[in-house]
Image (cartoon, rainbow, N blue to C red):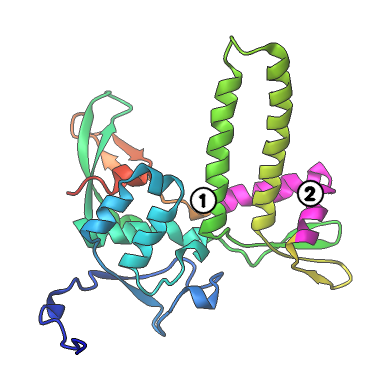
Amino acid sequence: MENTAQNPLIKHFRQPAIYITLPSRGNFWDPSAINLPPTGEIPVYPMTTKDEILIRTPDALMNGQGVVDVIQSCVPNIKNAWAMPSVDVDAVLIAIRIASYGNEMEIDAKCPKCGESHKYGMPLGEVLSKIQCPNYDKPVEDNGLKIYLHPQNYFSLNETNQRSYQEQQLMRTLTDPNLDEKVKIAEFSKQIARIVELNIKVIVDSTACIVTNEGVTVTDPRFIQEFYENSSKQVIDKIKKQLEKNSTDASVPPFNVKCSECQEDFVVPVTFDYSSFFGQSS
């Protein structure tokens, strides 16, 4: 007979540690990728032992699958983390860190005035509350066109980061003085082409739609990519400038500290090397 008895330990399973409101407020999500409660607040659970192993495994982090698995484990309302807008990624990971290890995270910082290094307790809840979503309602305008942007999803962002890392590795290889000059020139030309392709892909993935002066709304990524490939540098520069602003607006704000040696106030940037971010508890 099938055992249908309920586990008597179920009430001791992990429970939500905190509830958060996503910076995106649920915008830019595919409805099938998230179960957003009417309140807009989603529960965040602490990591399991399996989650901790995943988040510290280099290969799983490099291909993004480890981050996705941990997010879906700790934030079960997120059904498909690959579809998560990039503006929500840092906030969700900070929330998981808080749920697992507590609000305070110890960081090392060197005072720019006296040069002394000390450990400081960073209140992650305060950092989390300051993360904002950029304003995507205002379009980039050029020659009668209105170009509306939106955040990349995590799949696109991860793919972009992987390709960018590979390109950087290749560029370092091309500086090898022992490499044949003809081979170096040929590979360098290919590299330039790949960088251009990568830049276009980021812009395409960050474009929600383009509205013409005749009122036609274009959403097909193929048409949008063809447009960018045949656009002037002026158009591309406008888009890149706005993307840089959006990235700055959505970034995790720096942490303000006071040097315990000379009492100098200075700021410490909050960086996201996931393996180290989750590799220490307060």
Residue 237 is situated, as x and y percent measured from the top left of the image, at 73, 44
The residue sitting at 60% across, 47% down in the picture is 244
Name the residue nearer the viewer: 50 or 108. Answer: 50
The quarter of the displayed image where residue 268 is located: top left
Q: Residues within 10 Å of mark 2 (few under 14, many from 20)?
A: some
As measured in the structure, the alpha-carbon distance from the residue carrying label 2 to the one carrying label 1 is 25 Å
Is 246 placed left or right of 5 in the picture? right
Residue 130 visible, this angle? no
The residue carrying mark 2 is 235
Q: Give the image location of residue 100, x and y in percent.
A: 22, 59
Residue 282 x, y percent position in the rendering: 17, 49
Which label's residue is closer to the chain start, 2 or 1? 1
Image coordinates of residue 8 in percent, x first then y, are: 10, 82
Q: Of all residues shown, which one is farthest toward the left? A: 8
Q: Residues within 10 Å of mark 1 (few under 14, many from 20)?
A: some
Q: Nearer the viewer, mark 2 or mark 1?
A: 1
Residue 57 figure quarter: top left
Quarter containing the N terminus: bottom left
What amino acid type should be assigned to the residue bearing mark 1?
Answer: Asn
Query: CB atoms at circles 2 and 1 under 8 Å apart?
Result: no
Considering only vertical position in the picture, is 15 above or below 198?
below
Label 2 amino acid?
Answer: Val
Instruction: Give yes or no for residue 234 being in the magenta stretch.
Output: yes
Residue 219, quarter of the rendered image: bottom right
Residue lying at the far front of the rendered structure = 1
Q: Mark on residue 60? A: none
- Which residue was labeled with disc 1? 158
Report the magenta residues as a range. 222-248
Q: Secondary structure at mark 1?
A: helix
Residue drawn at (44%, 58%) of the image: 89
Q: Nearer the viewer, residue 7 or 247?
A: 7
Residue found 46% across the figure and 75% down from its top: 34
